[in-house]
Amino acid sequence: MDGTQDKAFRNQIGSFSLSGIDGEERIVRSAVKGEASSFGLLYDYYQPKIYRFVIIKVGKREEAEDLTHQVFLNAWQNIRSYKHHGFPFSSWLYQIARNEVIDFYRTRKYESRLDYLDENYFISPASAEFKFDQGLEMERVKLAMKQMKPDYQDVIIMRFVEEIPIKEVALAIGKSEGAVKLIQHRALKELKKILS
Amino acid sequence: MNLLELLKKLKGVEPDKHYTEKSRLIILSTPLAKKLKYTSPWLPQLKFIGAFAIASLIFFILLGGFSNSKFSAPLKLSNLDPVGLKAEADAIDIQIQLTDIHYQESSGAENESTQALPLNNVQKQAENLSLKNQTPSTSTPEITIDEALDRLSR
């Protein structure tokens, strides 16, 4: 699919909103049938979220880019096996992302030394307006989160960074909603303790 | 700034645009793996019919269906021949009778004598006892011990 066709498709769809369930279901159904342009729309919407999720967990931009690319490549290759049945597409993507990060830690030697952390990963056009002290604070938060359990990290990122509903978080991490609430409470408590 | 506000600020982290465009292009230009897909609406029914047919065939074979068919006469099993079976049964009956009589004879003699009776005189015993078989009575014949011993010694 070239850029011209992609633009034409987007113009046809118009200013769609993926927040509406009906809209996303229609696009996902089309993508499941093999429509690359539909999957492209899903990629545009979810790629920044998955990237943030991954980079907060792994810390390095290059690694985060590779992993994010792998997440969407896997999703596209296995799109035909996706069945909605009340399971949101975002939860499916986050599941793939979690598995990729787990495999990343399994296959590579992970070193938690501070100098391995990319100092510039917070720098982006959107964050350019951040004040210097806020940038430092966010880096502290990021370092503190890396000391937490993976489940705690996942819930913190999905609930408080991406503001994903509890139900979708529960589906993504394979736990009940009650368990997610409990993890959320404990994760925040632990994060505050580490930061203090 | 409190913790929750800081976490929300992390939403400002964005991937590099050049990386995003390159990644998107590579992913969408990757062809999907071709998967065999049966689109026939009759497939579920065909599967059921096929499974049922195979199960019926196995059941038919287990019941010996082929042996009853005239087209598969060479495959007839010997143990299903009624005539042969009857002859076999008759033969078994005869053997049982002889053995039974032999037992009665030998058990009667043993009660009176401590000497063991010869067990290889089955034929002689059979001849002697054939006279006995003429009588319909199945009860033990009234003979003296001496007479019984004489008969056995012949």
Image: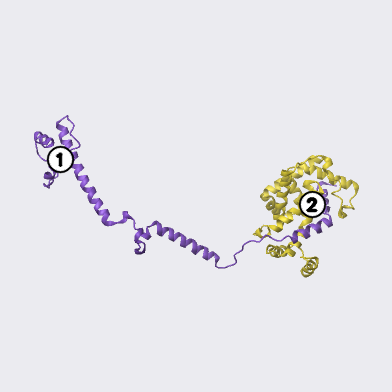
Chain colours: A yellow, B purple
Q: Would you name the residue on which mark 2 appears? A: A65
- Dot 1 alpha-carbon crowd within 10 angstroms: few under 14, some 14 to 19, many 20 or more: some
* Residue on which disc 1 sits: B124
Question: Quarter-wise, where is residue A195 in the image?
Answer: top right
Q: How far apart are marks 1 and 2 (CA)?
A: 105 Å
Count of numbered marks: 2
**Whether residue B71 is situated above or below residue A166 in the rendered picture:** below
Residue at 73 percent of width and 51 percent of height: A97
Q: Is residue B42 visible?
A: yes
Task: Judge from the rendering whether residue A81 lies leftward or rightward of residue A43; answer left or right.
Answer: left
Q: Which chain carries label 1?
A: B
Residue A25 drawn above or below residue B78: below
Residue A79 lies, in percent from the top left, at 68, 59
Label 2's element?
Answer: helix
Kind of element beneath mark 1: helix
Q: Residue at x 11, y 40 (%)?
A: B141
Q: Which kind of residue does numbered mark 2 sit on?
A: Glu
Q: Nearer the viewer, residue B75 or A27?
A: B75
Q: Nearer the viewer, residue A29 or B127?
A: B127
